[in-house]
Amino acid sequence: MSVQANAGVYKVDNKPARASYAERNTAHWRRNLIVCVFGSFTTLVSLSMLLPFLPLYVQQLGVTSSSSVIQWSGVAFGATFFGTAITAPMWGHLADRYGRKPMLVRAAIGMAIVMSLIGVAHSVVELVVLRFIAGLVGGYASASIVMIGTQAPRDRAGWALGVLSTGALTGNLVGPLVGGFLPAWVGIRGTFFVGGAMIAVAAAAATIFLIREDFDRQSDAKRHVTLNAEKQSTSNGSILFALLVTAMMVLLANMSIEPIITVYIGQLDVPTNHLARIAGIVMAASALGSMLTAAKLGALADRIGSWNVIIGCLIATGLAMVPQAFVTQWWQLAILRVLMGMTIAGLLPAIAKLVRHSVSENKTGKTLGYLQSAQFSGQVIGPLIGGQIGARVGLHEVFFVTGSLLILCAVVNQWAKSRQTKAQQLRDVGQLA
């Protein structure tokens, strides 16, 4: 295959090359961003609103002992993340072949159906299986990242992904609040039907009728070579690996406190009858901080470079973890979690932007799928590691270990940045020659 350029018009095998996917969807990406933010918010509200009453539902399904209730609740909660981690690369690959919109529609409809089925579960095993299936067939937020990451212009991608992240974070924050009062109105089982209907109407219908996409299987699903793509593409797998590991570590660090937070707060002289409420506030604190800064830090990545934002945020988040081990009041922990959320918010949009522009256009969906898989793996692994360290070493050590891992990630990303810079310099010298 030969590539020629003449007066700015690129040709592949002496035939005019069609405009790239991002160029053809320039008129749609802002509209699609609004719909994806709304859809991500809605689906994540529906998925997270079960948190306050999940143990109660497990009890309704026949589990009696308190230890078993806790164990099954943890398994049911993590099953969705595990399922999404498995299938995210596959859905991303299919998005490259068949378009991004079909994947959004598939995720919304699949989640609406499974969410409703959870409301008719007869046993705790069925609950876990259905939560796992929700992860396998769902992933609306993941599919949204693939669409916006491939449609947004390079100089606006960080901001767009930051806005999308804000919508998802808001959904995770609002969901448990909704789940706190909705069962009193419609019952626990009825809450799942409401969640399914919410996804069907707000996410699926909006996606089907409002999302616009110009996808051409003849060109977008096949290898599409242009001079610009050759300049932007990199075959350095070690850089991509560093970014994927970093994405996993971000969620691992954020979730590592989840298994110990109630016990840790209990050691801060919080009355037992207020423990659950205070723990919920502290859990939500990091999401609140991230909502405040996600879009701003995404825009900052567009201005000063994604690598700089990633390295800076990793160092700041790692340092913000340490004082959490020395708090004496619960409100001190909440404030520190807000600050940590503010610094951690810039990481995932900046990582997604770098991953998006590190591979050729026809592989972006699959690669961003791997990124989502890494993130959800962190959500599964983080609570496991935090629980083990808290039980075997000590609660304070959880903060020291996760903070140290984030600082180590900053060093790895500085190395990856240097490696990419040198590779770009070599390409520039080769083109000048």
Image (cartoon, rainbow, N blue to C red):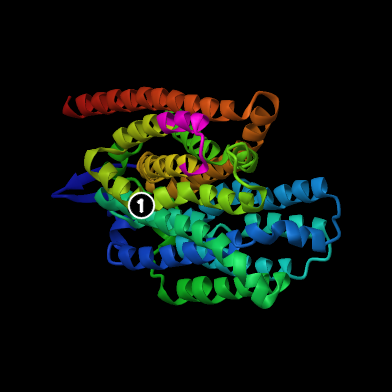
Task: From the viewer's side, name the closer residue of 402 and 151.
Answer: 402
Residue 237 percent coordinates (x, y) = 45, 30
Q: Nearer the viewer, residue 338 or 175?
A: 338
Residue ID at (55%, 63%): 177
For the stretch drawn in magenta, the main secondary structure is helix
Q: Which of the 4 image quadrants contains residue 315?
A: top left
Image quadrant holding the C terminus, namely top left
Percent across and percent down for residue 153 are 28, 53
**321 and 84: which one is in front?**
321
List the residue tagged with mark 1: 292
Q: Is residue 411 above or below residue 76?
A: above
Instruction: Identify residue type, mark 1.
Output: Leu
The answer to whether 332 appears left or right of 432 in the picture is right
- Is 78 contained in the magenta span? no
Residue for point 33% across, 52% down = 295
The magenta region covers: 318-331
Position of 5 with respect to 382 (left or right) is left
Q: Is residue 362 above or below residue 249?
A: below
Q: Secondary structure at mark 1?
A: helix
Q: Total label count?
A: 1
Q: Name above or below for residue 194 compared with residue 158.
A: below
Q: Quadrant of the N terminus?
A: top left
x, y percent for residue 396 = 57, 28
Q: Residue furthest left?
A: 7
Q: Does residue 13 appear in this view?
A: no
Q: Residue at x 45, y 30 (%)?
A: 323
Q: Position of residue 170 (x, y in %)?
A: 45, 59
The answer to if 324 sits in the magenta stretch is yes
Q: Is residue 351 above or below residue 284?
A: above
Residue 160 image-quadrant placement: bottom left
